Amino acid sequence: MQISEKYNPTETENKWYKYWLENNYFHSTPDERPPYTIVIPPPNVTGILHMGHMLNNTIQDVLVRRARMQGYNACWVPGTDHASIATEAKVVAKLESEGIKKDNLTREEFLKHAWKWTDEYGGTILEQLKKLGCSCDWERTKFTLEENLSKQVVKSFVDLFNKGLIYRGYRMVNWDPKAKTNISDEEVIFKEQNGKLYYLKYRVENSDEFLTVATTRPETIFGDTAVCVNPNDEKYFHLKGKNVIVPLVNRVVPVIEDDYVDIEFGTGALKITPAHDINDYEIGKKHNLEIIDSLDDDGNLNSFAPKYAGENRFIVRKKIAKELEENDLLLKAEDYVNKVGTSERTGEIIEPKLSVQWFLKMDDIAKPALDVVMNDEIKFFPEKFKNTYKHWLENIRDWNISRQLWWGQQIPAYYFGEGENDFVVAENIDEALILAKEKTDNRQLTTDNLKQEQDALDTWFSSWLWPISVFDGLNNPENEEINYYYPTTDLVTAPDIIFFWVARMIMAGLEFKQEIPFKNVYFTGIVRDKQRRKMSKSLGNSPDPIKLIENYGADGVRVGILLSSAAGNDLLFDEDLMLQGRNFATKIWNAFRLVQNWEKSEEIKPNSADSQAIDWFENQINKTLIEVADQFEKFRISDALHLIHKLIWDDFCSWYLEIIKPNYGDPISREVYQKTIYFFEELMKLVHPFMPFLSEELWQQMGNRNIDEALVISQQKKAENFNEELVKNFDFTKEIISGIRNYRQSKGISPRETVEIFTNADAFKNEDIIKKLGNFDAVYFKQKTEKPSFTFLVGSTEISIPLSENLDLEEEKKKTEEELKYLQGFLISVEKKLSNEKFVAGAPKQVLENEQNKKKDTLDKIKLLEEKLKTL
């Protein structure tokens, strides 16, 4: 069947993806084959595809498709995350646009709206991944808030509570006034911000003296309960045991002493507001200070600041600075740059807040999770991330796992009284009632007497179970699937969630399965623009991935994004990369069209050049297979693609096909043609994980395939030993041909015009190939020409081509002298480096050898040019 002149990516992609799905090629069930399992880092349910997803999921698909073609039972589990904070914020915003306030709804009413929103917008990103060609087992699609997974989250909470690892405590937390929930330390992003340092005057009680205190947050004076100085600060010795009056508030507070205060910062005196700063809180506990919370959940001032009640904290900051100045209570205000904590999800400035929350003790479960990475039971690629991981786990704090949200798994704690310990933890209310009766010894209790905790669990407390929960591993610990697919094989993720997700999944795996959750973690880089800025919607610097697919084809985009994506290194996005990918697809398409158009003949037998080319390319494929396997072993996916790109573009298209190509109008040996189609099939297998659509299309065109012969489930050729000498000889052959072609090009001689060659070699390997592609009519071995000639070296082999008689010898002499002058200058620079004792002593062996080789090559070239000048 004749293929079309141009490759149509859209038509091809739709056709083959539908075909793969209809034939269930992506679905996996346990069988006798070894499993290869990947769980997708679940994107937010209401999210859309961005460049980071493109990179991450392309890599996963490459790994999965390759494993499938290597005989593994490949299972890639897709799914989405309910994303508590992000999704609830979107639902709240939507409701407000309709005039509905969340506060006026019951939990059940709000959740109906949230599920409606999720049903309407959720899953878009998974459909977009199909456009990219992702070969997920879509029948296994999971959602972190679906009933089966939620049950496992609740079960894990109960288990950890019963082990004494979860506790409820009154602590200072990071409050996000926009999302109206606390967030963990890891979700706080510190950013530099220009502000002011205000110097406030606190009058010493029963005195005209003022104590000056520097603060960046004058609006918090309504919560001041002390002023603290360093006990070694001589300038404040006279204030020991005295009180000061909080400006405007007129509250009398004590002057206390603590080593925590930095004598050199500001004035050396610190206002203490235990409800609004973690360090102040610790000092407050130590000195038994009163706690006054002057801010509400929205970040507005409350009734402790009557004049400003209900106003935003930052508006009050400006107003109160002005009022302080008017009352001569502000000494000065100077520009100041400080780091401010912001919410990773909403970007809102975090407000420290005292609150009763639920925490998971981390010390006991962190150490085993550290050990399995440091001893390489779980391998990180690149390895540099082990240090980042180690630092975090060695300095870990208890995990605040409760969130003041409704969208999420509701914490399974049930209260039966107002006391601090008047609660039980159970998987459901019926079990909670039994426990409550036992705890209170009150048999009259009913479920009406129980009230479930309103807070939901942190989203990460759900997704840390992901490799287990997707296989129902906590509900049915010994089911066939968890025993077959777990531990999973590889995890592909971004380094910015190494703490949020990677570390916690390792902890969960060891805690609940006593087994690691995966064997390898591949950290992708971050996709940045040419100015090295992280791509984001807010900056408007991120292209629409679906538009890229429409413009360049999914295969083109996949190749483009992977060609420049080394493990763990950021990718500087350039749309030209996509063009490079599309051009590669066009090159392969045109190569097949060329081969397909050749007329085949049974009578013609392979000539010597054909046979030499076939032997070489068979060995070249095996060499590349070994090299590609090595790169995959090291998770150098980009390098593996470069090797395949070179094999197809350079070795196959530029060399092999050129050698076997029949003269215009002549047929080709059917034997050579069939061997060429065999090579093409093997190349399509090799490139399929990277370019699934194009490779499947061409594979199907190469023969009458049965339904079970789809490329997606075919077996890749296994790497075999190759003849190293044969491959090396062909590299020599290529250099000779390239040298002859360079001569023609530089002298403007037509490729059709034959030349004669003189060489110091005894013979040429692959002489027939050299003759065909170099187009010479005679070669004189072990002979020199006396004529002016173009001479080049291939190793120690000298090749001379007599110059054309109509060549301008004076011009040639001038060019030769310029080249000689350049080489003599280059030689001086190399010799200077080699004569430098420090360089020679400190340079790696390979670098030193390279410089010595440069010297030898340059000397050889100089000698040739000097001899050439004698003939001109």
Image: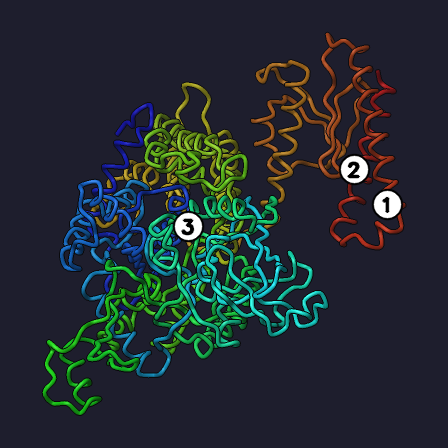
Amino acid marked by disc 2 = Asp
Query: In the image, what residue occupies the spot 54% across and 73% down?
Result: 375
**Residue 258 in the figure: left or right of residue 473:** right
Amino acid at the residue labelled 1: Leu
Note whether 527 is above or below 186 in the view shown. above
Closer to us: 619 or 708? 708
Crowdedness near tag 3: few (<14), some (14–19) or many (≥20) residues, C-alpha within 10 Å: many
The quadrant of the picture occupied by the N terminus is top left
First in sequence: mark 1 vs mark 2: 1
| The C terminus - image quarter | top right
Disc 3 marks a residue whose amino acid type is Arg
Q: Nearer the viewer, residue 278 or 633?
A: 278
Q: What is the number of callouts on the image?
A: 3
In this rendering, position of residue 622 left or right of residue 230: left
Pointer 3: what residue?
313
In the image: residue 150, left or right of residue 291: left
Q: Secondary structure at mark 2?
A: helix
Which comes sooner in the sequence, label 2 or label 3? 3
User: Whole-percent x and y of residue 572?
Assistant: 51, 39
Q: Residue at x 36, y 37 (%)?
A: 545
- The residue that disc 1 covers is 834
Name the foreground residue: 130 vs 91: 91
- Say if residue 42 shows up in the picture: no
